[in-house]
Each structure stands twice: as C-alpha cells, then as structure tokens.
Image (cartoon, grey):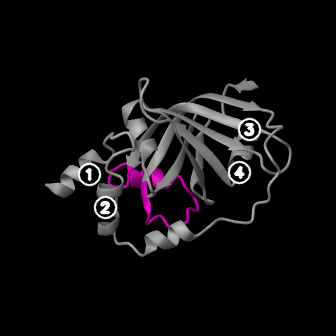
C-alpha cells in the first residue's frame, strides 16, 4: 500500500475512468450497522480538487450514508480496477450531504459537466479527502463493463418533485438503525 499526498494526475485519471465505486460509512460508537454501497452511472462523480470529491446521490432504498455523515462525517470511497492493470484506490475523509433543497446544491451541481438526468438526485455527497492510498488489487477479478443501467433514471422520471419529497419522508426518513435522515425537510413537509 502507498499513501499519497493528494489526488494527483495519475490517480485522478484512474478514479475518473472507473465505471463504479464503493462508499463505506458507519455510525458512531459500538452499535449500529456499517454500510457499504455500490455507486455508478457516468457523469455522477467529480474530482473537485486535490483533496475534494463529490458524487450525485440518487433516491434509493435507503439513505444510510446521509445518516452516518450527519452523525460523524466519516466516509471512505473505494475504486477498483476490474479491467487493465490491477489497482485499488481508497479516499478517506469527512463527508457532508448537500440536499437538493439546499441553496448550495445548484452551485455544486455545476461541477458535474455531463450528469445523467438529475431529477432523481436527492443530494450531493461532498468529501474533504484527508487520506489517499492505493494498493495492488491483485485479487480483484477481471470483469467486462457493458454499460450503465438506466432503470434508476427511468424510475425517477415517473415521479414528480412532490412524489420524491414524499419518498424521502416515508422511505428515507430513518436509517436502518433508526437515525433520522431528512429531519429538517420532513418537519417542513409535515408542518
């Protein structure tokens, strides 16, 4: 394993070339569940600087990452080479969720030059990277990339903004450990 001072040109090129990555977060303390989520779709990840990255967070079956980031900010992103020379890059840092309802959302969204339809995005996850490392990846299998799935985009296209707000309130109101997620938005919707 090698630790790097920053996301330099070579690491940036590797990260941006990967069609998927993994996000890991955990609640504070000894209890609760560690969460690992696969992420993908071209145009949904951006390297914003040598120590800053972000990705578009679409509505989904859970919102553990947002709950954990709200609680403690800890996050790790992992990129694996499934084609070409073996490599694994991990970005450790402090993350935050910028909800679609936030005034900062539009400015940060401009950092994504060619995102797919953004109607279904519920937030942008921004990470201040404090540790960059890579390792061999010798045991990561070789796999072929056939393309992005469009099911998530098509699913969200059928929902109005009000439907998505209700989805966040009902299905993303709490993490699997009972931690509140979109608490401020839920209060505004209920009140």
Closer to the chain start, of discs 4 and 2, is 4
Indicate yes or no whether the magenta region holds residue 69.
no
Between the C-alphas of marks 4 and 3, the distance is: 11 Å
Image spot of residue 136 (x, y percent): 81, 33
Image spot of residue 144 (x, y percent): 79, 59
Residue assigned mark 1: 185
Q: Secondary structure at mark 2?
A: helix
Dominant secondary structure, magenta: loop
Q: Residues within 10 Å of mark 3 (few under 14, many from 20)?
A: some
Callouts 1 and 2 close, C-beta under 8 Å? yes
Between the C-alphas of marks 2 and 3, the distance is: 36 Å
Vertical placement of 35 versus 169: above or below? above
Place residue 130 in its image quadrant.
top right
Q: Residue at x 53, y 52 (%)?
A: 111
Between the C-alphas of marks 4 and 2, the distance is: 31 Å
Residue assigned mark 3: 88
Residue assigned mark 4: 18
Q: Residue furthest left?
A: 191
Q: Secondary structure at mark 1?
A: helix
Question: Along the horizontal axis of the image, is 156 left or right of 88?
Answer: left
Residue assigned mark 2: 165
């Amino acid at each position: 394993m090698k630790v790097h001072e920053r996301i330099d040109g070579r690491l940036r090129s590797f990260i941006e070339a990967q069609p998927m990555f993994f996000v890991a977060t955990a609640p504070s303390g000894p209890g609760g569940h560690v969460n690992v989520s696969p992420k993908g779709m071209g145009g949904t990840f951006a390297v914003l600087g040598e120590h800053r990255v972000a990705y578009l967070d679409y509505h989904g079956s859970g919102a553990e990452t947002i709950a954990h980031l709200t609680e403690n900010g800890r996050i790790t992103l992992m990129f694996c080479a499934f084609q070409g020379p073996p490599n694994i890059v991990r970005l450790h840092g402090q993350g935050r969720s910028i909800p679609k309802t936030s005034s900062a959302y539009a400015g940060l969204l401009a950092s994504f030059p060619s995102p797919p339809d953004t109607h279904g995005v519920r937030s942008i996850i921004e990470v201040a990277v404090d540790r960059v490392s890579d390792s061999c990846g010798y045991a990561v299998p070789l796999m072929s990339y056939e393309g992005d799935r469009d099911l998530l985009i098509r699913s969200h296209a059928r929902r109005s903004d009000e439907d998505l707000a209700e989805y966040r309130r009902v299905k993303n109101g709490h993490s699997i450990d009972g931690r509140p997620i979109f608490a401020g938005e839920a209060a505004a919707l209920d009140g």
